[in-house]
Image (tube, rainbow, N blue to C red):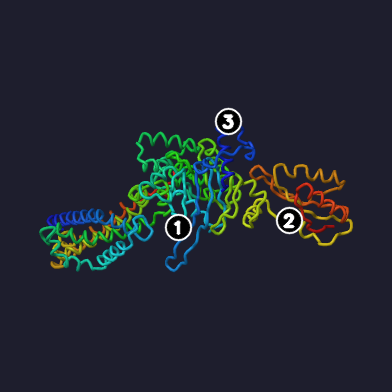
Amino acid sequence: MSPELINLIVQATGETLFMVGIAALLGTVFGLPIGVFLATSRKGELFAAPAVNGVLGVIVNATRSTPFIILVVAIIPFTRLIAGTSIGSTAAIVPLTIAATPFIARLVEAAIREVDAGLIETASSFGASPIQIVFKVLIPEALPGLMLALTLAIVSLLGYSAMVGAVGGGGLGDLGIRYGYQRFMPEMMLAVVVVLIALVQLVQSAGDYLARRVNRRLRQR
Amino acid sequence: MWRASELLCMKAASMNAHQSLAIGQPIETLEAISPAATAADAMVRFENISKTYPAYRGKAGVNALQDIDFAIARGSITGVIGRSGAGKSSLVRLINGLEKPTLGRVIVDGRDISALAGRELRLAQRSIGMIFQHFNLLSSRTAADNIALPLEIAGWTKADIKARVAELLALVGIADKHDRYPSELSGGQKQRVGIARALATRPSVLLSDEATSALDPQTTRAILDLLASINRELGVTIVLITHEMSVVRQLAKEVVVLDAGRVVESGHVADIFTHPRHPITQSFLAEVIGDSLPVSLASRIVPEPVGGGQAVIRVQVRGAGAGDTLVARLARELGLDVSLLSARIDEIGGQHVGSLVLGIPGGEGAATRTLAWLSQHQSPAERLGHVA
């Protein structure tokens, strides 16, 4: 493989990491509070607001059930409004973030719901406010689960980021389609797939490692 | 749990304790003080409490508590005992405002906690500690950091927290577990952390929700001893809810027996368990002293007298020193070779509680004289039958 092609792969990998990194970050910024709220706002819970919880749940489900490629196309005007363009890696961050947010929110909800309800009662018993309970009890106790949730989200985003290549989003997917598929360069297709596999492996291993590090439940000396 | 007059006695007793008079002095001999002081001197007062859980998702509504009206004296150790579903958990959660009564008021340290909400409630909750059956420690925090949590929530400075946590770890006897995570601690050690955490903000009331139910008997004893010393040394009022008679027996001075959401008996542990009236109380007592005969004896008992055999008589033993010399005196005064077939005596609140099963030789006349003698000596007795 020529140095030019290798250069292309390196550049595309950089674009993918950029898109996925920023989308994961923004997805967490929006998804974490939504997930915490979903996990604590049913009847009788910390921030009980069953109606809001219901509406938010429907929105989250609707976004999650829209196929990603349709989402990308459907929100082009919105993407242009935010990013100034609908083409390229920066523009691709918008649909990626919109897809990641509800996904992360549901994973966060599941992780927070895993925390023993007795701990919420305990913190309430010594006069903790709902906000204190979220930051001092729920998030620290759910941290291993949150780490795994974020890992899963990043792996999914790597897959989605390959899809935005189809609409000129740049990155490894874009490279695979333009060179590997349209120019019949199977070695390029293979290289792209290998890099993606390596990235997924890396992210998963790092996520597992971090989740284990913060999990004091299993810790033995 | 005791109405006005008895509460006054408690007040007097605690005053006497302050004046370093004998703490063990019988309460009945103390003078009552004016009724006006009673309200202020109850640490916790339930005023006509009812608690109903509304019907929800197809489940019928539940009357968890009904007509609860009693007081818990400052500095006392009170056991609330009942079977599962008797309403114990609801009752204890009314004290720290985790639950609200449907009717009535709960007064804690002179404040109507059932009327507080939001920030006011959270401030009041800092003076009420609680420990739990399953410890409820944060797995992500070390022992020290778990104890620090209520202090962080109360807004203490880092330096104050550090000093207080060290003090508390020493108080509960696990200073060396400072940096250990809950997963590295035994059940007893976890509950010690729980107790230290509950005491962190220097509460005046400590609530215990089945705190020893997940522990083995030896550890239970150690934890109960710790609670007793905390009550003695810090003057913290302790309210224990439990389904275990042994906990009440070892630790509580006062007891409230709860059944189906109602208080069926309440008073001094010794009084209640030497003269249990309600079937539930009797069944709890039976757990300690047992009311069944040894199998080998029970199988030999026949209803009709047996020639040359013995009448079998069961004597209830109730009260301080009861039964000490009972059999010896009976044998001497009636001139009978009394044999002891079975005996079980335990101590509750300093009072002996149990039963003796005696074999009386000498035919019908001797048996009748024995029953008469026992009745004269305030020892309730019954004839179970005869053995060869």
Q: State left or right for residue B126 relative to residue A204.
A: right
Is disc 3 surrounded by few (<14), some (14 to 19) or many (20+) residues within 10 Å? few
Check disc 3 and give the amino acid type: Ser
* Residue A168 showing in the rendered view: yes
Q: Which mark is residue B20?
A: 3
Q: Which residue is mark 2?
A: B293
For the C terminus of chain A, the quadrant is top left
Q: CA distance from mark 3 to mark 1?
A: 43 Å
Residue at 34% x, 47% y is A132
Q: Which mark is residue B102?
A: 1
Q: Chain of mark 1?
A: B
Q: Position of residue B124 (x, y in %)?
A: 41, 44
Mark 3: secondary structure: loop
Q: Quadrant of the N terminus of chain A?
A: bottom left
Which chain does the residue under circle 2 lie in? B
Circle 1 SS class: loop
Q: Is residue A180 visible?
A: no
Looking at the image, which is closer to me, B274 or B189? B274
**Residues at marks 1 and 2 touching, judged by CB atoms closer than 8 Å:** no
Q: Of circles 3 and 1, which is in front?
A: 1
Counting residues from the start of the chain, the first of labels 2 and 3 encountered is 3
Residue A133 location in percent, x, y?
A: 36, 49
Same chain shared by disc 1 and disc 2: yes
